[in-house]
Each structure stands twice: as C-alpha cells, then as structure tokens.
Image (spheres, grey):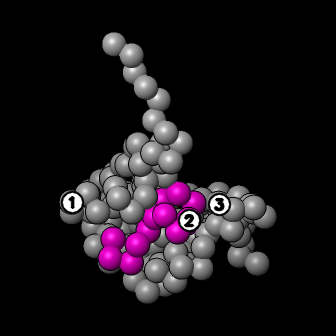
Amino acid sequence: GTIEALEEEEQNDASLVLRLTYGARSILLMGDAGLGVEAQLGAVDSDIIKIGHHGSTTASGTGFLEEVSPAAAVVSVGRYNTFGHPTEAVLSNIETVGAKCYRTDERGAVVVETNGQNLEIKTMLEKE
C-alpha cells in the first residue's frame, strides 16, 4: 500500500518524545511535540525538560509543565531567529512552575551530567 506523508502541520506531533531515567534522575525530551501530545502523556515527572518546539506557543502549556515539575528547562533556540521563539508565554509558563531556564541562544550548548543522584548543568557561554 501507499504511505502518505503527514501534512506539514501534523509533523511536529509525530516527534519522538523521550523520558530518560538514570538512577533517581530523569530528563524529558519533547522534540517538536505540541499541546495535543502533552495532553496524552501519562506520568512525566522529570528533573529537566527540553521544551517542545523551541518554545513556540504550540507547546509547553502551564498544566503540562506543572505535571512535569522540572527543576530546570532547556530551550533549544537559534539566536536572532525570525520565529519569535521562545515566546513570552512559554517563558512565563517556565517561570510559573519555578524552573530555572537555560536558553541556547543565550548560553550556547547546554550539557547535563548525572551519576543517577547528583545532577549538574553546564553551559558553553555565560548568560549575557
């Protein structure tokens, strides 16, 4: 049979979502998944979340972030991007849940290291 490609607006929600657990620590990687996928995920409590879809308004709702209850949120976003990412709404949602925000446009690469107990976040650049 023929396999039809997903419409462009459906492709983000086909992103792979991964929750990595090592010892007592976990990291949730949301890919480009949006609000619809967030509503379908079960228990996703995680220490760190890589915010979905570069911090666009189509992802990272407050209710979902409250369920994740992360200590830190990483936003992978290009400096001077023309999309307006991350949006003020998403940054506000991250602040509302009390997570520390690490943006790649401000800090360069973000590296997370854990031994299953301790968790350390390093960045390539100092925040300006």
Q: Write down the quadrant of residue 96 in the picture.
A: bottom left
Residue position marked by numbered label 2 in the rendering: 56
The quarter of the rendered structure image containing the C terminus is bottom right
**Residue at (40%, 21%) from the top-left corner?**
3
Q: Which mark is residue 102?
A: none
Tell me if residue 50 can be seen. Answer: no
The quarter of the rendered structure image containing the N terminus is top left
Q: Is residue 10 above or below residue 106?
A: above
Q: Residue 33: x percent and y percent?
A: 43, 53
Residue position marked by numbered label 3 in the rendering: 77
User: Quick one: SS at disc 3?
Assistant: loop
In space, the residues marked 3 and 2 are separated at their CA atoms by: 10 Å
Q: Is residue 53 magenta?
A: yes
Q: Nearer the viewer, residue 71 or 5?
A: 5
Residue position marked by numbered label 1 in the rendering: 42
In space, the residues marked 3 and 1 are separated at their CA atoms by: 26 Å
What segment carries the magenta color? 52-64
| Amino acid residing under circle 1 | Gly
Q: Residue 113: x percent and y percent?
A: 47, 58
Q: Nearer the viewer, mark 2 or mark 1?
A: 2
Q: Is residue 34 left or right of residue 110?
A: left
In space, the residues marked 2 and 1 are separated at their CA atoms by: 22 Å
User: Quick one: SS at disc 2?
Assistant: loop
